[in-house]
Image (spheres, rainbow, N blue to C red):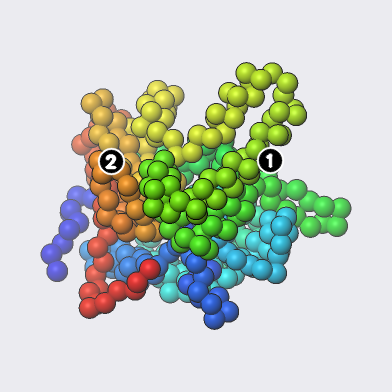
Amino acid sequence: MKSHLKNNVKKVILVISDLHLSAGKMIKGRRNLLEDFHFDNELIDFLNYYCSGDYADRAVELVIDGDFFDFLAVPYVEFFDDEFWSEKAALAKLKMIMDAHKGVLHALKNFVAQPNKNVVYIIGNHDAEFVFDSLKEVFLDFFGNFKERVTLKNDLVTYSPAKGISIQHGHQYERAHQFDQNNSIVETVNGEKYFVPPWGSYYVTNVINKYKQERSFINEVRPIKHFLIHGILFDTFFTIRFMLSNVYYFIMVRFWHYYILKKNLRQVIQDLVRELELFQDYETLTRQFFEKNPESKVLIVGHTHNPTLRLYTDGTIFINTGSWTKMVNLDLGQWNNGSALTYAKIYIKADDYTLEQFDEVVEVDLKHWQGIKSLPYGEYH
C-alpha cells in the first residue's frame, strides 16, 4: 500500500466531532429512531488505520471535539422528567451507549494501547453529563492500564494541541446550549446529584425527540428555514404541528421567564433574539476569535454538522469538522454528501517552532474518510 505519510512529520493530530453515538439501533427488540450513528465499522477502520501501518510508531493524537456520545438521544424509560438529568440516570445512559457500540469502544482502547497514541475528549452539549466525575471515571476506567493516555476533564473548553491551533466544540457561542462545565451540578439534601442542563437540551428531549419518532430526519436537515418551507409545501400538517410546538415551548420556557424577570421590553426582545440564535455564522465568530486570540492561526470547531474549510488572506484558517451522522443540505450552494465522515488532519513537522514559522511547519486540512473495507452492501437508514 502506498504511503500517504510524509517522512518529516513529527506528530499527526486528528479531530473528529459530532458522531452522536447513542443507545443503538435496537432497544428491547424495537427499532430505536433516536439513534443517529450508523457507521461503527467505518469508525473502527478509521481508528485501526491511524494506529497501524505508516502510523504504527508515529505520534498520533485523536481529539474528540464534543458530542461523541449523545446522552440526549437515549430513550431510557425508567427515568422520567427531571430524573432524566440525575447522576444515576446519566450512568445508566452511559452504560447503554457503551454496550450498544462495543466495537467502537474496543477500537478506541486498542488505539491508545499502541505506542505514541493518545486521546483528548472535549465535552459538547449532547454529552454534557460527562461533567459528573462518576461518568468520567467509568469511561476512563474502560481503558485500564492506558487510561493515562485519555484526557477528559471539565475545564477543557478550548484545547491547543500545538502552537497556533485552537479547538472548541462551538456550543458555547449559542445561549441555548451554554452551560458552566464546572458549576452545573446541584446536590440534594440526600446527596443525590443532578445536572442542570441548558434550555436547548430540554428542547431536544421534549420537542425534537418527540417529532423524531414520526420523522427520523427532523434533526438532519439544514438550513432549518429551507426545511420549514419545504415541509409546509409537501408535509403541511406535520410541519405546522412541529412549528406550533416550537413556538409554544419557547414562549413557556423562555419568553415567560424573561418577561417576569425583566420589565424592560426592549431588553426582553434583545435577549430573546440572542436566545434564538442557533447554528450561528461561525465565519463571523472566527474573525472575532482571531482578533481576541492573536496567538492562534487555526480555529477548529464542530457542533453545526456543516463541514467547512476557509482559508483567509491573513493566513488564518477556519475548519468545521462536520459530523459522522447522515445530513441533508437543502442549500444547493453547499456541498451535500449526505454522510460525509469528515475530520481535520494536522501534520506537525517540527518539535518546536514560532508563529512566524507556522506556515512552514504546520499543515492543516479537512479530510473525508471513505473507509478501507469494501462490502457489496450497506445498511439502509
Image point 54% across, 35% down: which residue? 276
Q: According to the image, label 2 marks what residue?
A: 309
Can the viewer see residue 326?
yes
* Residue type of the residue flagged with mark 2: Leu
x and y percentages locating residue 51 in the rendered image? 32, 65
Q: Nearer the viewer, residue 201 or 11?
A: 201
- Residue 8 vs 257, above or below: the answer is below
For residue 40, side relative to residue 66 (left or right): left
Residue 362 rendering spot, x and y as whole percentages: 26, 41
* Neighbourhood count class around disc 2 (C-alpha, 10 Å): few under 14, some 14–19, many 20 upward: some
Residue at 32% over, 59% down:
339
Residue at 17 percent of width and 58 percent of height: 4
Mark 1 vs mark 2: which is more N-terminal?
1
Question: Which residue in the rendered view is the most extreme toward the left?
Answer: 2
| Residue annotated with mark 1 | 252
Q: Looking at numbered disc 1 in the image, what kind of residue is underneath it?
A: Met
Picture quadrant of residue 229: top left
Q: What element carries label 1?
A: helix
Q: Which structural element holds mark 2?
A: strand
**Residue 274, image x, y percentages:** 55, 30
Q: Dividing the picture into quarters, in which one does residue 262 lie? A: top right
Residue 192's spot in the image, x, y percent? 79, 57
Give the residue at the far right of this rendering: 189
**In the image shown, does 2 or 339 lie closer to the viewer?**
339
One can see residue 70 in this view: no
